[in-house]
Image (cartoon, rainbow, N blue to C red):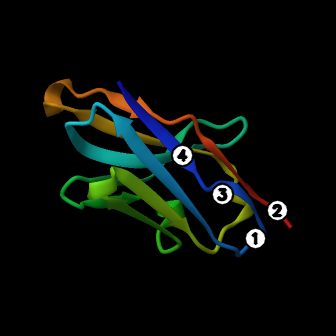
């Protein structure tokens, strides 16, 4: 079994910064990619940023230049640094990861989510 645990959410003023982390634990053989998603009330869950084991990074257009995803392979942890936060960034942020022995059969695991509130 694999568990993903997010931390770092909270309340921040518009224009402020917040950092999230997501640690994977359990029976980890390979982590092929990890990603951050978010879901605002009444909206679908959307991809925020992803990073592969090789370091290839992808961002949603709405966060480019403001958010930075990174990972520490030794700690099986992915981070999301969020700067210049806007009210529309407010959502529950989830991390996920494709983790397993072989890529074709590796499940995608999800964390429980952490709330990010952007408000003055």
Q: Is residue 14 left or right of residue 68?
A: right
Residues at discs 2 and 1 in contact (Cβ within 8 Å): yes
At numbered mark 3, what does the secondary structure look like: helix, strand or loop? helix
At numbered mark 2, what does the secondary structure look like: helix, strand or loop? loop
Residues at discs 2 and 3 in contact (Cβ within 8 Å): no
Q: Which mark is residue 6?
A: 4
Compared to 16, does 109 lie above or below? above
Residue found 28% across the figure and 31% down from its top:
27
Q: Earlier in the sequence, mark 2 or mark 1?
A: 1
Q: Quadrant of residue 2?
A: top left
How far is disc 1 from disc 3 in space, using C-alphas? 9 Å
How far is disc 2 from disc 3 in space, using C-alphas? 10 Å
Q: Earlier in the sequence, mark 2 or mark 3?
A: 3
How far is disc 2 from disc 1 in space, using C-alphas? 6 Å
**Towards the viewer: 69 or 63:** 69
Residue position marked by numbered label 1 in the rendering? 14
Q: Earlier in the sequence, mark 4 or mark 2?
A: 4
Residues at discs 1 and 3 in contact (Cβ within 8 Å): no
Q: Which mark is residue 83?
A: none
For the C terminus, the image quarter is bottom right
**Towards the viewer: 39 or 105:** 105
Q: Is residue 37 left or right of residue 8?
A: left
Residue found 55% across the figure and 38% down from its top:
45
Q: Which mark is residue 119?
A: 2
At numbered mark 4, what does the secondary structure look like: helix, strand or loop? strand
How far is disc 1 from disc 4 in space, using C-alphas? 22 Å
Q: Is residue 75 left or right of residue 15?
A: left
Residue position marked by numbered label 3 in the rendering? 89
């Amino acid at each position: 079994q694999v568990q993903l645990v997010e931390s770092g959410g909270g309340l921040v003023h518009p224009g402020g910064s917040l950092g999230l982390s997501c640690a994977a634990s359990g029976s980890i053989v390979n982590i092929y990619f990890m990603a951050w998603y978010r879901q605002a009330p009444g909206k679908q869950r959307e991809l925020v940023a992803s990073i592969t084991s090789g370091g290839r990074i992808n961002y949603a257009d709405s966060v480019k230049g403001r958010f930075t995803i990174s990972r520490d392979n030794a700690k099986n942890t992915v981070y999301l640094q969020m700067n210049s936060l806007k009210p529309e960034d407010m959502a529950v942020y989830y991390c996920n990861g494709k983790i397993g022995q072989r890529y074709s059969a590796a499940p995608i695991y999800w964390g429980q989510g952490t709330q990010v509130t952007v408000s003055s």
